[in-house]
Amino acid sequence: MVTSLTNSAVRKPTDLNNAGNGLVLRYTQVKDKKKKTTRTFKSEVKINGSDVAIIVRDLVTNRVISKNSFPSPTSHDNTGHETLE
């Protein structure tokens, strides 16, 4: 059985510039009825300078289960566009 609690602040577009060095996205709890075990995970966005990654961490062991980094920002000077709007 899986239950989760999503941060209501991320249900709409979120400006990561105002998120400090991280933003919690969701807590998830996975119960294995056969093994009678429960694992709890935290999914968060971590920001380190211009590096941004989504990290999933096991809360009991504090071990990183998954880390997916976003590509580094690149210049769009040669596109002929003034803005992204």
Image (cartoon, rainbow, N blue to C red):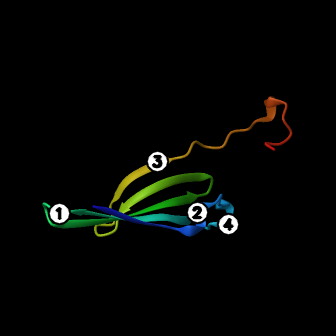
Mark drawn on residue 33: 1
Q: Quadrant of the C terminus?
A: top right
Q: Quadrant of the N terminus?
A: bottom left
Counting other residues with Cα less than 10 Å from the Cα at mark 1, is it few (<14), some (14-19), or many (20 or more)? few
Counting other residues with Cα less than 10 Å from the Cα at mark 2, is it few (<14), some (14-19), or many (20 or more)? few
Residue 46: x %, y % from top left = 52, 60
CA distance for labels 1 and 2: 31 Å
* Amino acid type, label 2: Val
Counting other residues with Cα less than 10 Å from the Cα at mark 3, is it few (<14), some (14-19), or many (20 or more)? few
Q: Residue at x 80, y 29 (%)?
A: 78
- Mark closer to the chain start, 2 or 3: 2
Q: Residue at x 57, y 42 (%)?
A: 71
CA distance for labels 1 and 4: 40 Å
- Mark closer to the chain start, 1 or 3: 1
In the picture of the structure, the residue carrying the numbered disc 3 is 68
Labels 1, 3: front one: 1
* Amino acid type, label 4: Asn
Q: Residue at x 38, y 52 (%)?
A: 66
Q: Quadrant of residue 59?
A: bottom left
Labels 2, 4: front one: 2
In the picture of the structure, the residue carrying the numbered disc 2 is 10
Element under disc 1: loop
* Amino acid type, label 1: Lys
- Give the mark count: 4
Residue 75: x %, y % from top left = 73, 38
CA distance for labels 1 and 3: 30 Å
Report the front residue among 31 and 80.
31
In the picture of the structure, the residue carrying the numbered disc 4 is 18
Element under disc 3: strand
